[in-house]
Image: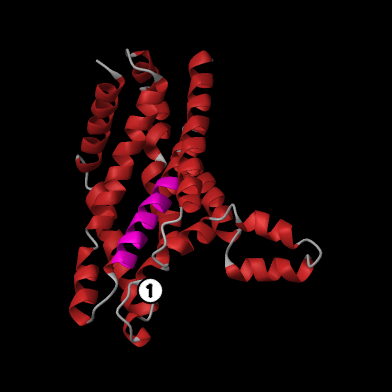
């Protein structure tokens, strides 16, 4: 079997594991309820008086902050707790194949949850004439944002066998990536570091908020794509290093 077959096998095993229990369905229901609430109630969808999904995408960095780590915290922590990591790594597959397979399965699960928000898209098209190109870019950005959070959760999950610890570590890390470029934080930093404007820009460049804003405006910038893909690659590479250290130990 080649690498693609190995990855597909691992991904299929992991994805079927999600729907083998009620956890997947509970997550999807909670996600849909929260997106609906924050879009139409907290986001002021009707008060805006415009046919757009600004209020929908506005809350995604914060929704994913808790929901995505809840999905990713079990990826490797569960394997370590049950003692099946050693069994998995002794199979004739490379560590990176197992990592990519598990990650893709979880990412596909998150993508499914995102696709199921289509009633909101239908609603905004029924009520007005939105720019669906902008909405499509927003969905692409949201999926990349979820993938970045998930890769970080995958990394923290490999660090510990305790899922709660993994959850907390991933939430804290993702929160830093939000706050680094969140406008209230950058304005506060500006007041204390007028002499170092480039430092503030450098810090903001590491924020998911800075790079997600372009997608919300309908702009698919290569720099934003590279940022999210780099976060995913770096986190998965670090996961590989951690798992190899476990194998060596």
Question: Can residue 16 be found in the magenta stretch?
Answer: no
| Coordinates of residue 215 in the picture (x, y in percent) | 41, 61
Magenta stretch? 133-148
Residue appearing at x 60%, y 55% in the figure: 205
| Camera sees residue 82 | no
Colour style of the rendered protein structure: secondary structure
Left or right relative to 120: residue 97:
right
Q: Residue furthest right?
A: 195
Residue marked by disc 1? 55
The local crowd at label 1, few if under 14, some if 14 to 19, many if 20 or more residues have their Cα within 10 Å, is some
Question: Can residue 144 be found in the magenta stretch?
Answer: yes
| Coordinates of residue 239 in the picture (x, y in percent) | 49, 31
Q: Is residue 176 above or below residue 103?
A: below
| Coordinates of residue 199 in the picture (x, y in percent) | 72, 56
Residue appearing at x 37%, y 81% in the figure: 44
Left or right relative to 8: residue 180:
right
**Which quarter of the picture shows residue 187?**
bottom right
Q: Is residue 199 above or below residue 155?
A: below
Dot 1: what SS? helix
Q: Is residue 191 above or below residue 47?
A: above
Residue appearing at x 24%, y 36% in the figure: 17
Please, what is the dominant secondary structure of the magenta stretch? helix
């Amino acid at each position: 079997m080649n690498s693609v077959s190995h990855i597909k096998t691992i991904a299929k095993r992991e994805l079927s594991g999600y729907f083998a229990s009620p956890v997947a369905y509970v997550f999807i229901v909670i996600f849909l309820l929260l997106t609906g609430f924050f879009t139409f109630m907290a986001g002021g969808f009707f008060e805006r008086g415009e046919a757009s999904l600004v209020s929908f995408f506005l809350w995604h960095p914060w929704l994913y902050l808790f929901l995505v780590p809840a999905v990713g915290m079990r990826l490797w922590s569960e394997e370590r707790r049950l003692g099946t990591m050693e069994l998995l790594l002794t199979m004739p597959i490379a560590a990176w194949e197992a990592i990519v397979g598990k990650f893709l399965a979880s990412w596909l699960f998150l993508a499914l949850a995102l696709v199921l928000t289509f009633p909101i898209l239908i609603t905004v098209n029924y009520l007005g004439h939105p720019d669906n190109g902008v909405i499509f870019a927003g969905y692409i950005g949201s999926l990349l944002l979820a993938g970045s959070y998930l890769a970080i959760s995958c990394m923290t999950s490999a660090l510990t066998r305790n899922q709660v610890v993994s959850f907390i570590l991933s939430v804290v890390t993702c929160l830093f990536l939000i706050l680094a470029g969140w406008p209230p934080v950058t304005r506060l930093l500006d007041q204390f570091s007028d002499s170092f404007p480039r430092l503030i820009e450098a810090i903001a460049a590491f924020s998911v908020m800075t790079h997600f804003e372009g997608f919300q405006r309908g702009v698919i910038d290569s720099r934003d794509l590279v940022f999210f893909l780099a976060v995913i690659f770096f986190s998965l590479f670090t996961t590989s290093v951690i798992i190899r250290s476990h194998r060596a130990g």
